Amino acid sequence: MRNFIFLILSGLIFAGCSMNAKQDTIPPVVYNSSFEPQLTYLNGLIEDDPENPEYYFQRAKVFFDVHKYNDALKDINQAIYLESNEELYYELLARIYQKMGKTSLALNTAHRAESYKNDDPELFLLLSRLYWEIKDLGKAQQYLAKAKQLAPVHSEVFLLQGIFDSAKGDTTAAVRAYRSALSQDPENAKPYQELAKIYFARNKEDSAMYYVLEGRAINPNNPFFTYFEGVILDSKGFKTSSLRAFRKAIQMDSAFFPAFYRLGVDAFNAGSYTEAQTYFTPLTDKPEFSLNSNLYIAEILEKTGQAAKAVSYYENVKSEDTTNIKAKEALTRLYKLYPPVVVAPKVDSSALKPNVKGPLTDDTLKSGVKTPKVETKKDTAKVKKPKPIVPKDTTRIKKNVPTIKKTDSIHNIAPERKDS
């Protein structure tokens, strides 16, 4: 009995020591509505131990939660630099890229995380959403199926299923899926977003506003709810209030692109073209907004007397949508006024042999590039050499004067220069 008690106490002491050792390595970070205490705490830890990747990872998560994606990106890259084989680091990096609108980078990074750990439902859900963003529904559903197999009652599984159902036009099934997501996790604010959009599309603004307010109560830092409140207010004719909501959403998240687009359209319609271009410019490479944003900027440049600059934006539209009539007509019109400049290919002087002989022109002398030798056919016809006429020398030749041997002299005749 005494030995049994001793073993239990030894086990507790050992467990306590292990927990303390781990605690010293990775201290806990408690998240709440104010992120400054966490940042202050983590800043101190990083200052004391700048080689610990976990501290940078934790601080990156804090920055991510408050939508400071550039700061989060810097920290997570430092964590990966210090520890390059941690799956969670790459997963967070992928989420940061997704929020920044860099979907291709997000996909590549998420697959890098998958190469380290391929049984994480959260990672499969992220991949499903990323493939959905690039409109690859097949792969999006494949990864959703993998996530569902590992976590069949996961709230995000129902959420993504609702998104897919909504895209197919079955909003009834989508609403059912979103409500299932909320039943699994009442604190998940994302289903409220999707429900607000569905009821707004059904012209039920009051129901849409209800879901906006409910979602914002759960996640007050989410810019979507402030933005969508502006959308509903705009539909009711409250223009000033709606614009205020859009600007506030951008203050909450400087990468919340739907608010940029709404403000750009409003400024364009009001004739404030410079302001509109400022809002549209960050959207020219974002898949959801790029086509229309390039079109708006092209029109703005034409309206402000900068038609030549508009060509590249119309070309962007054409490359994204080859059937876009507006871009085609504009390019046909503009190329008549501003013909494309054909740039002659540069001559690679290193490819020419330095000992090549040939005629030098003014241009080659200026450029220092030797013209390759032009081969000409030799005239094979035999021409009789005229016999030299030697005048008779009546003078007496001394015997001791050596005889001069005759040599034939060859005269090169320069070809006629063809003036260009």
Image: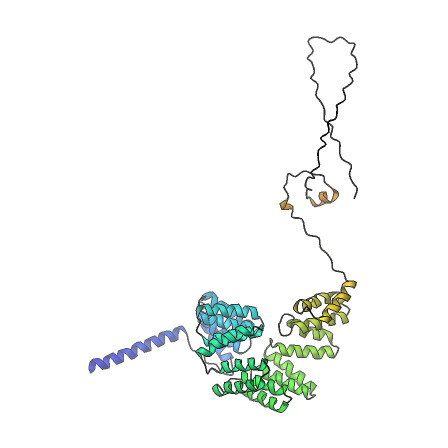
Residue found 63% across the figure and 85% down from its top: 201
Q: x, y percentage for residue 319? A: 66, 66
Image quarter of residue 237 = bottom right
Residue 300's spot in the image, x, y percent? 74, 72
The x and y percentages for residue 31 are 48, 81
Using the image, determine if residue 284 lies above or below residue 32: above
Q: How is the image coloured?
A: rainbow
- Above or below, 402 against 122 in this view is above
Q: Position of residue 306 (x, y in %)?
A: 76, 67
Of the 4 image quadrants, the one containing the N terminus is bottom left
Residue 137 in which image quadrant: bottom right
**Residue 59 falls left or right of residue 332:** left
Q: Residue drawn at (51%, 79%), measured in percent from left and top?
A: 36
Please state if 176 lies on the left or on the right of 331 as rendered.
left
Q: Is residue 127 visible?
A: yes
**Front one among 75 and 366:** 366
Q: Residue at x 52, y 78 (%)?
A: 65
Q: Is residue 48 visible?
A: no
Quick one: 88 or 290, which is closer to the camera? 290
